[in-house]
Image: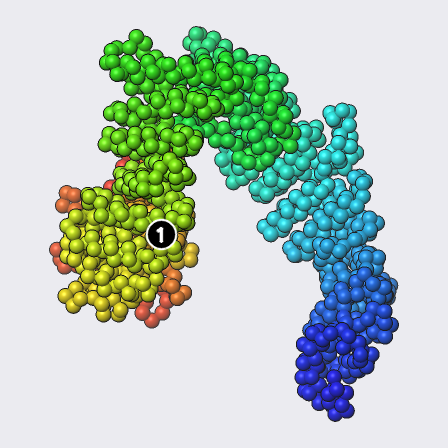
Amino acid sequence: MSSLERPGTLESPLVASAICSFLSFVLPRCASSVLHLRMNESLMMFNSILENSEQNHSLQKSAILCLGGLLKAADPDEWTNAALSFHHLLVLGIDGKPKVRRRASSSLAEVLLALRGTESGDSASEVVFKVCCSILPAPATAIAAASELRKKKFEVAKAEAERATERALHLIGLLKTVLPTLASSWSSRICELIVGFYPLGQPLLTKHATDTLSAFLRSTDSSLSEEVLVLLLERILKCQEAWDVQDADNVLAAVFLVAEALKQLLARSSKQEYPQVATAYQVLVPLMASEKEGVVLGVAEGLRQIIQHTVTESMVAKQVSNGGKSLPKKSTLRAITVSMESLLGLRYRTVWIHAFPLLGFFLEKMGNACTVVAPSIIMQLADIYAVPEEREILECASQLEDALGKAVRAGGPENINALLPLNLIGALDAVSGKRGADVAAAIEAGGGRAWLLEVYKKHIQCASLAFFAKEWLPLANALEKRSAVAKSAGRALEAKVAIGLETQIWAVLPAFCHWTSDTSTSFPGIAKELGSRMQSRPDLRGIICAALRQLVNDNIQVSKTGNSTKPAMEDEGEEVAQILVHTFESGFDEVPEFYTSDLAQRNLDAISSYSKNFLPVLFNLYIALPPDKRGDIHATIRSFSRVTDKKLLGTFFRTVMKKLVLAAAGDTDGNEPASTEGGATVAERRCTFMELALALAGDLDEGTVPVLYKACKPALMEPEVKVQKKGYKLLAYLCTEYPNFCKENIIDILQMMEAALPLCNPASKLNRLHCIEGLLVAIVDLAGDTLAPAEKAQAMTVLVGEICLCTKEVNAKTRSLAYELLVQLADGFPQENGGVCGFVNIVVGGLVGGTPHMQSAAVMALARLLFEFPDELEETAPEILATVLTLLRGRSREIVKSVLGFVKVAIGKLGIEELRANLQSILESLLLWGNDSKNRFKLKVKVILERISRKLGFEELEAAMPHEHRKLLTNIRRTNARKERRKHEDGDYLSEGDVDVRSFATRTSARSKAQSGWAHTDFFGDGDSDDDPIHVSNRRQTRSVGARTNKAPGSLPGAASRKRARQGIGADFGEEEGDPMDLLDHGMARHVLKSGAKRAALEQAGNEEGDREFKVAPDGRLVIKREWEHEVRFAEDDEENNDARSAGGRSSRSKYARTEGGRSRMTSKTGVSSGGRSARSQKSAGGKSVVHEADRYRSKKSKGDVKGAKKFEPYAYWPMDRRMMNRRPSKRREAKQGLQRVLHQGD
């Protein structure tokens, strides 16, 4: 500061600018008390600098920062002395220089924010308001004055108006920054001045005013009065310049300004009837017809916000009169509805994908009154949805269905059914006499709305079960009778349609049972009908069971957890996953507010009172059905057992256990049982009653546990696979659900498991693993008085060893569970026992097992643990690696295969230093099998060496490699160089814009690997991929080789071609190495069809347009291959042209590429030319040749074609093809593929 006060300092602009720049950084960091000492002198000095530095912009900007820093630190009580400096800063905020203006605006905002809430802040806000009063009205005054003048005076007035407009624009820009920091009383008055720009009709003023007001309203400090907000809405909605769709930014700013203004207006006032609300819809809705997608999206979002704040329950309740049955003609809600209904006009057809969600949201906001307020919208949506052809053409079919579904949820099935009756009986009358192809049209012509049942099924929520029992159940019964009458009269089609419609009605029942509002009062009236239909109608049995489970599970969830948003309780039956057809998936897992614990308990009491009726029926059905169709019944029994009275449930359980004992006794005695209840054989009967016992045991007391335990003990020793699996399933349930019983009987259970191990079938391994899981948890938590420490360690070692052995199982589920158990046990192993390292020491003991199978399993288990816990095993991993490598010196190929997989994991997980330290020992052990081609060991060793080279480098690997094996390293180097060279030559990489056409299985595998990181077949499979699984699992760029659109598998040379072709075929059918396709998976079957269609489309697109697309190299260059330069020119005689397909009696399948520049290109898959000879011998007997390419006509000196001497006119050539005369249209179409383009180019 002293330097600035020196007389000669200000005379040097550079020195003054440097000092001010330094002070601009120092002053904000100085204490206020220090700045107060010389506040007045400093302010006067900087005012003087700013007055005398108009031409020095750098000095001016630095001085502004210094002045702003001083004003922020000024004492509010002595603001009078700083008022002049503040005014000076305010004037600079509307200066003509943009950088000075921006710097002054930011400084003003900081000063006003520091003064906020004080009297000085109010005084400063008043100063800003006075400046606004002198500048903002000036453009309107100048424009009005100029409009009354003529000629020369008009030009002068026009120039004055332009200057006034410019100053106003500068001030608006300043206000955009400082307006939120002003006192609320003054900011509201300034906004009123800004609103005055809209009637002027000046686009630039309108745009800046809109931006400033939008920024102010979006700030948390906006507090405009009701009068100003009404004035703002009135002015902006009438301003045509604000809604010019050519200026998308201006329109979007205006839209969100209106939305925010309406939000604040309705929040500050209890009045709902504002004419500006309806006007806003009338102005914004037509903007949806804009051709600019950005405008459409912005307007749709703005309308959604306006609907959110303007359509409320209180507003709807006030305006819907006559007991909620009608809407007054002159009301805001009716005007809003008319505007929203116009979105369904043909004018907005192209934006229906955005309009349908808006309409759905609008109907949802109105709730039950939507059928009264907007019946025409619902009916028009239904009319569009009712036409299947219309839905197929529309790209927004899902949005349409969602909008209609929101109407169903909001209005309820009762109101929607009154507005859109199903009219199935009338539709059935129209079907009479029609044939199969006309059934759908006849139902539609008859006024039937069977399609609406599917919408009900997906979107009903919190409906009334009484409505279903009163309205739709009689309709279903009538359709059933109609079907029986039609069938007896010989009208098979009518009978089939009637029974189909009845089934569709019943299919909606699970939706009615989801959070139904009247279970306690309505279920007794429908329970008898449900039980009767369950017994008499097998086709409806699954639907009814799903509905009953939905009722029970929903209420159990609420009664146990209260009104929360936890997901519904899951059934634990073995075959629940098989319930695919009748599973109800509504997607509404949130518990409604009215669904309290008391209501849920009343509902459960009503359902429980009918358990004595439903459970016997379910038992009889379960016993009578074959095992593969019991999934629904078993899950329903399990659900009902949770709400049944304990005494009654105990009676049922004892009955089931008696029948189980009788079945087991019959098996033991070898006598033919008197009854075949539960199955034709003894094993089937035992399985049936064990499953029933398990279904009933879920809610019994612990007194029944010993009974179940006694029942499962003989089943473990049973050689019959089915019985053994059920026995292990029962034991697994006891070990996991009753840990206290497991701890008390741990010795007996361990002895029984040890005795049953030799008889355990591979199919039972999965359930046995579940038993081991529960036993291990019990052993870890067990006190020392039951098992001695040595016995505990021995038991744990045996069980862990069995888990390790299961990693060698063929069944993928068993193998995956074994790996998962290893990880969970290691993660939860007590720290006092060593934690992860302690558990690994137990697994390491398997390396000295008595069999190669056990040693191999231990190596695989260690690989999984090292993969999961590399940090915890950082110190012990080198020792484990050294121990495992010694196994390579044995002769067991099973062990060697596992060790090679372990080395793959170790290379990826060990650090570089650890890997470098163990490199010599790794190479010595690996190279023992480097020349053994059996079991692909040689290839596996090569892949491992390549991974080491990627991590450490070729030079370091070559230095450690023995001399006699360096040829292998040279081969790896050459192979990689060849791959890279071929990759860039063929453009075989995923550049930007390429389509990822991986198969479903490949993509799914990539996702699962990215989530879990572990894949058994990547490390221990027989594949020869040289990709590192550890890195592949974390990237998504893996693609099926040979599946690209620009290259067929057959075009690849030699073995690589055959390999890629096999992979491409496997990818189409969702197969991966080691993971065959599940033919029973419906999702996979659907995807195979889709992937086949997509691949055919991509291949066709590649044939038609592949030549037009150029590859992009990694460095961004275009890779343009002129393939015609490398092709052999085909020459044919006129006689040979008569049969271009013959090849010595064989059919040569040729592909005809499109003509480029009059040149026809032809490639043959068989290597035989089109004329039946090789390409080199295509000459006539006279030695002449005919070349059908454009090169012979291309001019060497200029562009275009030249005829030349003794040549024909330039022409396009298309060879003859016998398929053109084939009787099959597909063959003719295939032969003519591309011909149209040749003809166009030849014109």
Q: Would residue 564 be found to the left or right of residue 640 on screen?
A: right
Where is 466 relative to 870, above or below?
Answer: above
Label 1 sits on what residue type? Answer: Cys
Say which of 127 and 392 sits in front: 127
Q: Quadrant of residue 92?
A: bottom right
Q: Would residue 860 be found to the left or right of residue 197 on screen?
A: left
Which residue extends farthest bottom? 8
Where is 323 relative to 400, above or below?
Answer: above
Residue 837 visible somewhere in the drawing: yes
Q: Position of residue 832 (x, y in %)?
A: 41, 49
The residue located at (34%, 52%) in the rendering is 866
Q: Position of residue 137 (x, y in %)?
A: 84, 63
Q: Quadrant of the N terminus?
A: bottom right
The residue located at (77%, 32%) in the rendering is 319
Residue 636 visible somewhere in the drawing: no
The residue located at (26%, 24%) in the rendering is 718
| Crowding at mark 1 (Cα within 10 Å: few <14, some 14-19, many 20+) | many
Q: Position of residue 955 (x, y in %)?
A: 26, 70
Where is 768 relative to 95, above or below?
Answer: above
Say which of 697 and 939 sits in front: 697
Where is 525 relative to 744, above or below?
Answer: above
Say which of 869 and 842 sits in front: 842
Q: Quadrant of residue 514?
A: top right
Q: Secondary structure at mark 1?
A: helix
On the image, numbered disc 1 is attached to which residue?
837
> How was this image coloured?
rainbow
Say which of 423 and 499 sits in front: 499
Q: Would residue 699 be found to the left or right of residue 1072 on screen?
A: right
Which residue extends farthest left? 1181
Which residue extends farthest front? 785
The residue located at (80%, 80%) in the rendering is 38
Q: Position of residue 145 (x, y in %)?
A: 86, 64
